[in-house]
Amino acid sequence: MATFMLKLVLPLLFLSMIPPKTAYAEFEQWCVADEQTTDSELQAALDWACGKGGADCSKIQVNQPCYLPNTLKGHASYAFNSYYQKFKHSGGSCYFRGASITTEVDPSYGSCHYDFIP
């Protein structure tokens, strides 16, 4: 009987020592360009994000991991997300005058990684 109890209790004791895994999946959000936005609105928002907005736009420069595809929508999406992740906890939003939307689908591709900051 004691052996049976040990076989039952030890695994439970071991499992209780494993810390729970933190799951962010239901809260993960990225900020990307809205498909409905005109090129002129995207360009203005991209210019602001990479300029006064303070987004890190270094990875969308030529020969960097997020430069290709070399599209306005792709570059704007990366810049919008950079700004959003950097400033969302201090009042920044994913708005850009309506040029962007949030998504729960990670937009990263190939060697281009879109940051997510919990």
Image (cartoon, rainbow, N blue to C red):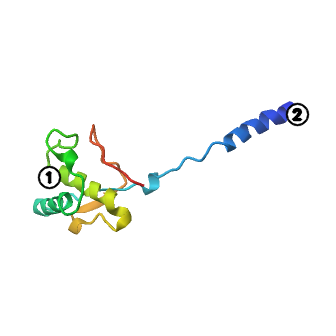
Label 2: few (<14), some or many (≥20) within 10 Å?
Answer: few
Give the quadrant of residue 2: top right
The quarter of the picture where the N terminus appears is: top right
Q: Looking at this view, is 44 or 86 the one in front?
A: 86
**In the displayed structure image, the side of residue 101 where residue 7 appears, left or right:** right
Give the residue at mark 2: 2
Q: Position of residue 32 (x, y in %)?
A: 26, 56
Give the residue at mark 1: 72
Q: Amino acid at mark 1?
A: Leu
Q: Is residue 62 above or below residue 2?
A: below
SS class of the residue under badge 2? helix
Viewer can see residue 32 = no
The quarter of the picture where the C terminus appears is: bottom left
For image coordinates 20% across by 47% down, the residue present is 58
Give the quadrant of residue 63: top left
Label 1, label 2: how many angstroms apart (C-alpha)?
70 Å
For image coordinates 34% across by 48% down, the residue present is 106
Q: Position of residue 15 (x, y in %)?
A: 67, 41
Q: Amino acid at mark 2?
A: Ala
Viewer can see residue 30 = yes
For image coordinates 28% across by 41% down, the residue present is 109
Give the quadrant of residue 17: top right
Label 1: few (<14), some or many (≥20) within 10 Å?
Answer: some
Q: Is residue 117 above or below residue 14?
A: below
Q: Looking at this view, is 116 or 90 the one in front?
A: 90
Q: Position of residue 74 (x, y in %)?
A: 20, 49
Q: Looking at this view, is 74 or 18 the one in front?
A: 18
Q: Is residue 31 above or below residue 19?
A: below
